Image (spheres, rainbow, N blue to C red):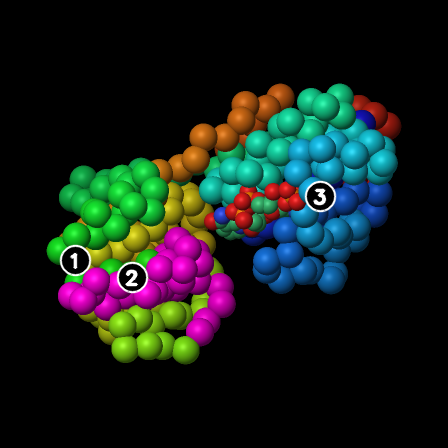
Amino acid sequence: MSRILLLGGIGEALNLARRLGSQHIYSLAGLGKVPEDLACQVRVGGFGGAEGLADFIHRERIELLVDATHPYAAQISHNAARAAEQAGVPCWALRRPGWTASPGDDWREVFDWPSLITALGDFQRPLFTLGREPLEHLHEIPAHQHWTVRCLQSQPASERAEVIGARGPFSLEGERALFERLNCDVLVSKNSGSAATEHKLQVAHERGVPVLVLQRPVLPVVDREFAEPEALWQALWQALHESGVTNP
Ligand code: NAP
């Protein structure tokens, strides 16, 4: 096993990619920054579904597929599992554990956009921190609400909504200042489990602000799953060395 295709898009994946040698490929969807200082090869953009990914694996003689995408990026994870099976290579995955509520937290799970809107009900100043999806619904904001949407791309504020373009990590002090300025009465979040974005939950706790948590998608079972990037790296290192690769 000497050539890896690493599917990324989160910080942990980039850290793994930084440790890979020039024979390996790091793949990004192309929504965020593309690193230019990696030793490994970097490719950007979709493969064209599971079939396209399986073709890519064949064409590039990939011997191990590693899915280190975001826990809510379910499509690419399902494609990865299918493509690896079709191409006859193993698929390993980084499956970052979710956050868990502490005593005193008021977390309410929602399943999709309609159930989220229902749960938002009587709240007035929601802070959305689950990506771009709320931007498609800015014209549906109920009369009693003002939304703040924090996502990667900013756009001009309107009377009914403010869109903050920002990329984590977010500090505890910064989150406290944001909640204070917005006076938000509910936080809307994915359960990404990332240390880079978890301070908002502490601030919600401190201020007694409820959190609407979008349920995690179901991800496919793969050959090996790792909760920690370091454990994944150790397994990669070992597999590469067993194949006689001296420079991973
Ligand atoms: P998604 O719905 O699971 O995937 C949509 C399509 O994007 C896939 O079918 C695939 O296109 C392409 N794609 C996704 N990741 C790719 C990768 N690493 N390399 C090449 N193509 C990829 O994903 P998403 O939720 O839109 O997220 C897109 C990317 O942003 C992911 O890489 C993810 O790790 C990252 N990200 C997502 C979130 C989130 O909340 N969803 C948060 C932070 C980062 P084809 O079918 O054409 O191959």
Residue occupied by mark 1: 123
Left or right of 220, for residue 133: left
Q: Is residue 136 magenta?
A: yes
Residue at the image point whose x is 17% and y is 52% from the top: 121
For ligand 1, tell me if the residue under mark 3 lies within 8 Å. yes
Given the current orientation, which residue lies at the most extreme front position?
A: 139
* Mark 3 or 2, closer to the camera: 2
Q: Which mark is residue 140?
A: 2
Q: Position of residue 238 (x, y in %)?
A: 72, 28
Rendered-image quadrant of the N terminus: top right
Q: Amino acid at mark 1?
A: Phe
State whether residue 103 appears in this view: yes
For the magenta stretch, what is the residue range?
A: 129-155
Up-down: is 40 above or below 142?
Answer: above
Say which label, 3 or 1, has the lower sequence index.
3
Q: Residues within 10 Å of mark 2 (few under 14, many from 20)?
A: few
Dot 1: what SS? loop
Q: Position of residue 148 (x, y in %)?
A: 31, 66
Rendered-image quadrant of the C terminus: top right
Q: Amino acid at mark 3?
A: Phe
Residue occupied by mark 3: 47
Say which label, 3 or 2, has the lower sequence index.
3
Dot 2: what SS? helix
Q: Residues within 10 Å of mark 3 (few under 14, many from 20)?
A: some
Gap between marks 2 and 1 measured at Cα: 15 Å
Q: Position of residue 129 (x, y in %)?
A: 37, 57
Q: Residues within 10 Å of mark 1 (few under 14, many from 20)?
A: some
